[in-house]
Structures are given as C-alpha cells and as structure tokens.
Amino acid sequence: VGATLAASIDEIAAGLAEKKPVAVQSDVEEGLAAQLEQLPEDMDESQRLVQAQLALICRQLAPLRTLAAHLIK
C-alpha cells in the first residue's frame, strides 16, 4: 500500500517538475482506496484508523492529479 501511494505521489511530482502530462485517473488507486475502505470487523482499532487514513489519502490522489494536469497545460 505504502509503495503504491509513494509511487503515485512521485509520478505526480515528476510530471509537475518535468512539465509532462499526468494521468488524471488511476484504476490502481481507485481499487486500492476501495479495498482500504472495507474495514474488517475484527480489525484492531489502531489498524482501522491507519487503514482509514490511507484510504483518505488514496481518494485525494485523483483531485491532486486533476490539479497537476491543469497546471501543466
């Protein structure tokens, strides 16, 4: 999960730095967010909190991608 999020953020940052197009949408990120949002009932409360926060970060990547794409144009 962490590696996927880091790679996505790096991709967006590289696109901005190099003024190269950034994909506005990512199926991988959408799938990961959906997976993270399905919190098992037996999960420890601390784990639930971390997993929920990771899901929120995932959901913020699409708007971030959109903003990056507009800045590059």
Image: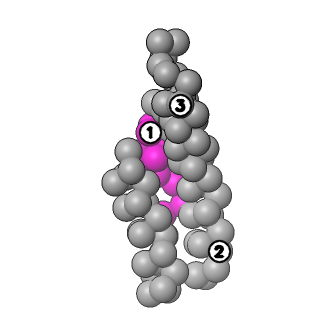
Q: Earlier in the sequence, mark 1 or mark 3?
A: 1
Q: Is residue 60 at least partly visible in the picture?
A: yes
The residue drawn where x is 53% and y is 31% is: 46
To which residue does mark 1 refer? 32
The residue drawn where x is 48% and y is 75% is: 13
Q: Secondary structure at mark 2?
A: helix
Magenta stretch containing residue 59, yes or no? no
In the figure, 44 relative to 12: above or below?
above
The residue drawn where x is 38% and y is 45% is: 1
Q: How busy is the neighbourhood of tag 1: few (under 14 within 10 Å), some, or many (20 plus)?
A: some
Q: How busy is the neighbourhood of tag 2: few (under 14 within 10 Å), some, or many (20 plus)?
A: few
Q: Amino acid at mark 1?
A: Leu
Q: Amino acid at mark 2?
A: His
The residue drawn where x is 56% and y is 56% is: 61
Magenta stretch containing residue 27, yes or no? yes
The magenta-colored residue range is 23-32
Q: Amino acid at mark 3?
A: Ser
Numbered tag placed on residue 46 in the rendering:
3
Q: Secondary structure at mark 1?
A: helix
